[in-house]
Image: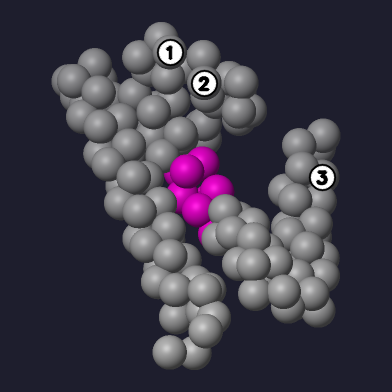
Amino acid sequence: MSGKKWGDKDMQLIIGNLLRGGVLLSTGIVIIGGIVYLARHGQELPEYGTFHGQPREFRTIPGIARGVWDGKGRAVIQMGILVLIATPVFRVAFSIIGYLLEKDYLYTAITLLVLAIILFSMLGGLGA
């Protein structure tokens, strides 16, 4: 026995499960959103001549949450995409906890810097 309570292999296993769970959760949410969207709009003819993009109400997290609460399929699909984007961010955040448990303060500081850059980049685009 190595005497370490927390090893690299344990951290890799948990991070792998975290990533796998995030991808599976987002996939499930997107599939449910697709079913809801097709149930409501499956008979409509799509207009391919003009690109409309996402409605303005689904471009913010509160707008997406309201849409999910109202049962709108597009909002549920957007929520699944948000979960997919959040999964690697949670991975980085969990890495900080893992490095702290290993008492590896250099990697903790580096990972904190990476998380700060990711959050600054993501939140900096909200005002545009």
Q: Nearer the viewer, residue 5 or 83?
A: 5
The region drawn magenta spans 81-88
Q: Is residue 84 above or below residue 97?
A: above
Mark 1, other Cα within 10 Å: few <14 / some 14–19 / many ≥20: few
For the N terminus, which image quadrant?
bottom left
Q: Residue at x 25, y 32 (%)?
A: 32
Q: Is residue 14 above or below residue 27?
A: below
Give the Cα distance between marks 2 and 1: 6 Å
Tell whether position 84 is magenta: yes
Q: Are marks 2 and 1 in contact (CB under 8 Å)?
A: yes
Q: Nearer the viewer, residue 97 or 34?
A: 97
Q: Earlier in the sequence, mark 3 or mark 1?
A: 1
Amino acid beneath label 1? Trp
Mark carried by residue 124: 3
Mark 3, other Cα within 10 Å: few <14 / some 14–19 / many ≥20: few
Q: Which residue is mark 1?
A: 69
